[in-house]
Amino acid sequence: MHNLDFDEEESMNRRDVLTGMSSVGVIGSVVGSRRASAATFDPANPLDVGMAYRKLGWSADENLTMHWMQLTRYGMVDAKLSVMWESLIGILYAVKDTPPSASGAKPGDYDVNSLTLTFYFDPKTGEVMEKYNNPWTGETLDIPYGGTTPTHRRHSARGIDIDMKSPPGMNASADSYYSAWTEGDDVWVRGDLDIRMEATGSGPAEMSMGAGGTGMKAGGAVMARLMQVNDWFTYQGRLSHVIDPDNKNPPASITFNDLNTWSTWLKMGEQPGNFIGRGFGKKVFAYDDMPDRWRKLVAERYPDVAKNPEKVIKG
């Protein structure tokens, strides 16, 4: 759901990790501290929202679960959007309640092992892309496909709770926002992430966004003075599933949007503009229910994952 500088993989992973920051909590909310009764769900109660977020966005059991997402990536320059590529994203994960004896554990914490595998496609031909011809710089760049090592992250009962430490030469801040809406038996849960890093010196600093999260360092290659990330996830499911204590892992659909500064591997330098994504997908419970094309590409490139995805995630 996670360290080179990726795009779609980094967006999926940012919901459960902020690397390069000192954080006392990470994105997520959980059933553990308060369980809504079968007759109540209060969108104003952060623990009810957290329960819905965990069940729809992750799970409250330990079974291997998956999300897939179809995403279009745009570059926006002078308010004009240009399609850069299409992506097909698969996220494999397993969740466990954090043992009370674990170091630093708090009531309601849970741990997620996840792996994101993304494939990039030419928007005109539909062929798999290995390189990207950057139309704004004229440079041809290798697309940084990731590996198959899962990330392990702890989530808290009330979502993100960051004690942000700015690296030398940087001002850094981050926050997340959760909310829920219900209409009849439908429930929508939103989990949004805001990360901002600015160089404080007289010149730019190197800012890099990795698949495992966000990292920055002063000095080195000059990249930018500002990095801004706005990730917006929305999960939709059945309210009756969310408030049912026996339904630990209900189905959900996913909508994703982001509005960011350029990803650093694109080497945009001082080129003005924004990096925008819009995607949709769903949760599935069997590997064979992932999209056919994604499974075929995983079998070709990552045969160990295709052979035994549960072993890769759970060890």
Image (spheres, rainbow, N blue to C red):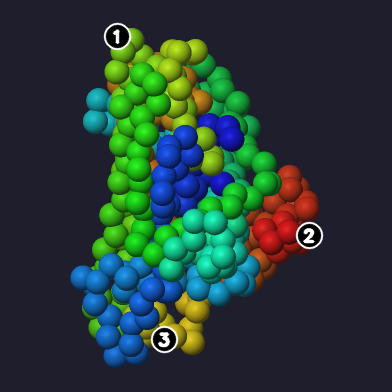
Residue 86 versus residue 203: which sits nearer the camera? Answer: 203
Query: Residue at the spot x=50%, y=79% of the render?
Result: 248
Q: Position of residue 307 (x, y in %)?
A: 78, 59
Give the number of callouts: 3
Q: Mark 3, residues whose alpha carbon is within 10 Å: few (<14), some, or many (≥20)?
A: some
Q: Position of residue 214 (x, y in %)?
A: 45, 36
Q: Please say whether residue 261 is visible from this viewpoint.
A: no
**Separation of disc 2 and disc 3 at Cα?**
34 Å
Q: Is residue 211 visible?
A: yes
Q: Amino acid at mark 2?
A: Lys
Question: In the image as oriented, which residue stretches furthest toward the top?
Answer: 202
Q: Residue at x 29, y 60 (%)?
A: 178
**Which quarter of the image is occupied by the C terminus?**
bottom right
**Mark 1 residue element:** loop
The residue closer to the viewer here, 281 or 249, is: 249
Quarter-wise, where is residue 50 in the image?
bottom left
Residue, disc 2: 307
Residue at which label 3 appears: 244
The residue lying at 24 percent from left, 30 percent from top is 79
Query: In the rendered image, which quarter is residue 57 located in?
Result: bottom left
Q: Amino acid at mark 3?
A: Asp
Residue 50 vs residue 131, the one in the foreground? 50
**Camera-nearest label, 2 or 3:** 3
| Residue type highlighted by circle 1 | Ser
Precedes in sequence: disc 1 or disc 3: 1
Q: Identify the residue position indicated by label 1 in the image.
A: 202
The residues tagged by marks 1 and 2 sit, at their Cα atoms, a distance apart of 52 Å
Q: Compute the Cα span from label 1 to label 3.
A: 56 Å
Q: Is residue 214 above or below residue 162?
A: above
Q: Callout 2: 10 Å neighbours few (<14), some, many (20+)?
A: few
Which residue corresponds to the image point at 47% horizontal and 31% vertical from the top-left? 215
Q: Earlier in the sequence, mark 2 or mark 3?
A: 3
